[in-house]
Image (cartoon, rainbow, N blue to C red):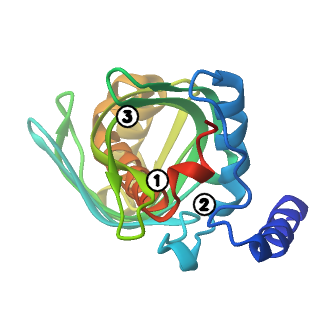
Amino acid sequence: MKTYLFAFLTFVLSGANGASAPFIKPCKLNDVECIKSSATAAIPFIVPGIPALGIPSSEPLHIQEAKSDQDEMKLTFKDLNIYGLSKSQFKNVEVDEAKSILHVDLETPLSAKGTYKLEGKILFIPAEGEGNIEIKTDKVRVIIDAKYTTITDEKGDKHWKITGYDYTYDLINKVYFVPENLFGGDATRAKPVLELFDHSWKELITEIGAPIIKDVVKSAVERVKKFFLAVPLSELVQS
């Protein structure tokens, strides 16, 4: 809470200077440590949202629906609230000017609460249920390569515009997958399904959780895209 309060006060006080993002320290594009530090400093501002720049909050990040259909299994998540992005830690942030690519490597805890509907089989084990669900992990690694181009706005200021991206992810720490009301609350029938998720969590959750990670990355990139379009390069890049 103190970090967010300090960040907010810094933003308000520095805003008098007329900068769109006064919390950002401009960096030379070959200064990896400066870029990483500047990106870290932006987290307390971007995650809660910056209405003045058109950036919505990411804590929680709301996902209306995500489907994960695998062979004989159908799984739908609804009304998921995702938490954890405020605790993201950048491992590396680089800009490849020649290829116009922004490379971001980060680790973050993630937790999600919402509802689910499951039917079918998981590795030949019958599974069905509908109700509340909680998914939690202390660390997932996400690597994003965002393609950008440089544009000029009506004021003559240059901006980066993200035009596409690729990503990969890896579940570093165990993922706890807790669906309520499996088999209508039948604990005996639910036990083998829960044991499967507990013992084979990485293989199963990597596939089942893919749509959730996809939406998290998409939402994060959309926010960064809005940020770049709102903030001139002159405030981000040191000449």
Q: CA distance from mark 2 to mark 1?
A: 8 Å
Callout 2 crowding tier (Cα within 10 Å): few <14, some 14–19, many ≥20: many
Question: Callout 1: helix, strand or loop?
Answer: helix
Name which residue type carries label 1: Val
- Residue 61: x, y in percent? 48, 63
List the residue tagged with mark 3. Answer: 205
Asked if marks 2 and 1 touch (Cβ < 8 Å), the reply is yes
Quarter of the image that includes the N terminus: bottom right
In the image, residue 108 sits, relative to residue 4, either above or below, namely above
Question: Callout 2: helix, strand or loop?
Answer: helix
Tell me the number on the disc at residue 46: 2
Foreground of the two, 117 or 211:
211
Tell me the number on the disc at residue 224: 1
Q: CA distance from mark 1 to mark 3?
A: 27 Å
Quarter of the image that includes the C terminus: top right
Question: Callout 3: helix, strand or loop?
Answer: helix
- Residue 56: x, y in percent? 50, 72
Foreground of the two, 231 or 137:
231
**Which picture quadrant has residue 3?**
bottom right
Name which residue type carries label 2: Ile
Foreground of the two, 159 or 186:
159
Foreground of the two, 119 or 170:
170
Name which residue type carries label 3: Ile
- Residue 229: x, y in percent? 42, 60
